[in-house]
Amino acid sequence: MFFGKGEIYMHTKRGGFFCALVLAILPMIIGRPALAIEKHGPEDKVAVVNGSTITQENFNREMNAFRQRLLSEGRSLSDSQLLEMKKDILESLINTELLYQDAQRQGIKIDEADIDKELMTVKERFPNEVEFKNALSKMNLSEADLRSEIKRGLAVQHFVDKKFAQGIAISDKETKAYYDGHRDSFKEPERMRASHILIKFDSRGEKSQKAASRKKIEKVQQKLKKGEDFAALAKEFSEGPSAAKGGDLGYFTRGQMVKPFDDAAFALKPGEVSDIVETRFGYHLIKAVEKKPEGIIAYAEVKDRLQEHLKQKKVRDEVSSYIKELRGKAKIERFMDKNQHDELGK
């Protein structure tokens, strides 16, 4: 589907890789072992942009934040991909610094209240202050550092919004032309809505426990055959998180559920109830509610999101061109230690 990866223009929101990643990653790393972060003195630097230093520590934070996100997603990079990412991160830091410097020249000011609001948004993702502090510690980051990053990010964001985004409007004609020219991007797979009743068992537990769960689901099945209401029985007997909603799972596509459940659900017609289905989660009774065939998402459904996507693309293109202009007038020096210098091919 077209919006599956959520494309966002770079160098605007939060002002750089690190601030964007740290806001997303801090909640993920609770309970995870901290990745090793190299220690460097205050004199260590990876670049100087118009006299302003980008430190080795900042670079390491960017790298570790990105690695942490990959870890949380179960992904890894090859050596060549890692080298490219190092190059991208260094250039992103330089670009962000250039935009921040220009924001300062343009007199962009950030209120402490705005920083407080952003910081509170981050803290609200944690169960308590202790967990928040632990997460910061794992990223070798102080709250003051985070406030500084938020301030810089907001300054860049406000600058880009003022200089570029506010002057860009996408017409209905542009949006419709894009939709008509990229209809394959708006394909939607077959979907179905179903409800289920789940009786759990531990697949590693005693056979007697599994047998007891089987008897319980069979009793529920008999109640259904006698005409009792599926949603009411789900609320009473189901042991899954959807029980409170009468077992309603909403819409899903093939492959989103475990295979036995998937196969049984998509074999049903609307209104039908499956036989007992066994998965690693337990025993299920599945009721098909509605099926939607494969098709093209209607223009009206995606118009607003598409308009925003096209606007972001225009902003991104204009920002990229503007950064090239800034680079052409800037004094940029790159400093890496010998190994990093060799790896980056500088």
Image (tube, rainbow, N blue to C red):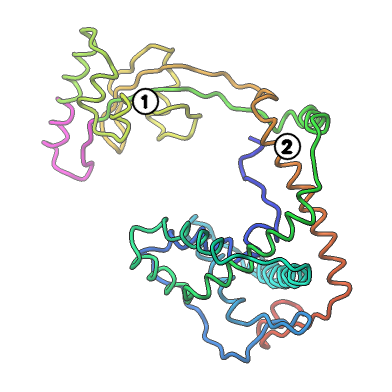
Is 129 displayed left or right of 48 in the figure? left
- Residue 198, picture quadrant: top left
Query: Residue 148 appears at what percent x and percent y?
Result: 57, 72
Q: Residue at x 34, y 22 (%)?
A: 286
Q: Amino acid at mark 1?
A: Asp
Q: Do the CB atoms of the residues marked 2 and 1 lie less than 8 Å apart?
A: no
Q: Is residue 62 left or right of residue 244?
A: right
Where is residue 250? Give x, y as percent: 43, 27
What distance separates the C-alpha of mark 2 from that of mark 1?
32 Å
Residue at image location 54% in from the left, 62% down from the top: 113
Magenta span includes 253: no
In the image, 137 versus 114, the foreground residue is: 114
Q: According to the image, label 1 marks what residue?
A: 248
Which callout, 2 or 1, points to the residue nearer the camera? 2
Label 2 Cα crowd, 10 Å radius (few <14 / some 14-19 / many 20+): some
Residue type pointed to by label 2:
Gln
Q: Which residues are magenta?
A: 199-215
Q: How many marks?
A: 2
Q: Secondary structure at mark 1?
A: strand
Quadrant of residue 95 in the image? bottom right
Q: Could you say which is closer to the camera, residue 39 or residue 23?
A: 23
Circle 2: element type: helix
Check the picture and name the quadrant holding the N terminus.
top right
Residue 179: give x, y in percent of width and height: 76, 30
Magenta stretch encompasses residue 210? yes
Position of residue 282 relative to residue 34, above or below, is: above
Mark seen at residue 307: 2
Res 237 label: none
Point out the residue furthest to the left here. 208
Q: Residues within 10 Å of mark 1 (few under 14, many from 20)?
A: many
Q: Nearer the viewer, residue 127 or 68?
A: 127
Q: Residue at x 66, y 87 (%)?
A: 337
